Image (spheres, rainbow, N blue to C red):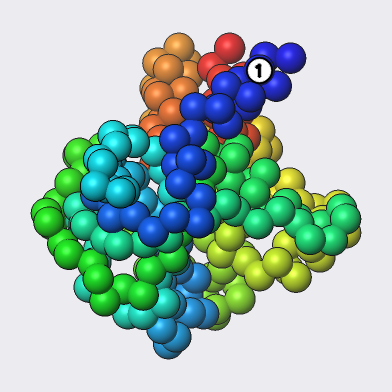
Amino acid sequence: LLGILNMDKSINKSMLSNFYEEEVQAICVVKENLTKDNYKEENFEKYLIYVEDIKHSESIYNINEKMILNIYNKTDIEIGNKVKIDLQIKEPKRNTNPKLFNYKLYLQTKDIFSTSTSRGNNIEILEKENLNSFEKTSINFRKNVSEVLNKSLDEKNSMLMKSIILGDSSFLDEADVLKFRKLGLSHILAISGLHIGIIFGFIIYILNVLKVHRSKSMLISIILIWIYGYLVGYPPSVLRGSIMFSF
């Protein structure tokens, strides 16, 4: 019941939904690069952005809301850049066939209610660095993990391991995700209590070998689990697992 009420409140608080299909000028901060590795050679980029203000019909609105930005061109923007960009705001597509993946609902669970498109030739970089130290640490962690796995494994296995370690199934093709679901193994792709348990047990074992007192090793393990959760962005399964292990 609380979940239903919270989702209803989240949907109704979206200001960007008032500008669907409208051309606007936005001031936003680039939070995350969502472009898949197999798009590297194509003129396409996808980002998670945080919209601070938009200008529409000579009026300026304070927004402070997340949005997906699709750019059909190569750009020089990087994570942390504050940019001014002309774009068109769109409502995310639902599943067009019954019982298939609902992209709009998936984005809503992440407090994202709008997508946008731009050609990329109308982006002005206002500031280079606009992230706090915690955000930089999280981004660098995910970037370093991706680089190590890309160098160590072939493309398919690298994508799989990134999905498991970072708790983000978007690295995999939809067909591969569907295979895991049909086999009843989709929980492997989400960092769950199983993954948290393995990490927790491994840390406890190492600390026991180092002769750390039991109570101290428990406390250190719990702290490290919460740090790991922050580094991967606290997906719901990690947050749930961390809370249960803490109790």
Percent position (x, y) of residue 92?
60, 53
Q: Residue at x 46, y 46 (%)?
A: 19
Q: Secondary structure at mark 1?
A: helix
Q: Given the current orientation, which residue lies at the most extreme front position?
A: 57
The residue lying furthest to the bottom in this view is: 41
Disc 1 marks which residue?
Answer: 5
Residue 74 is situated, as x and y percent measured from the top left of the image, at 32, 80
Residue type of the residue flagged with mark 1: Leu
Q: Image quadrant for the N terminus?
A: top right
Across and down, in percent, residue 179 comes to 81, 65
Q: Quadrant of residue 169?
A: bottom right
Q: Number of numbered discs present? A: 1
Residue 222 vs 198, above or below: the answer is above
Q: Is residue 197 visible?
A: no
- Image point 49% across, 34% down: which residue? 14
In the rendered view, does 161 fall on the left or right side of 88?
Answer: right
Which residue is nearer to you in this view: 219 or 28?
Answer: 28
* Residue 81 higher or lower than 111, as above or below: below
- Please tell me which residue lies in front, 6 or 14: 14
- Whether residue 89 is visible here, answered yes or no, is yes
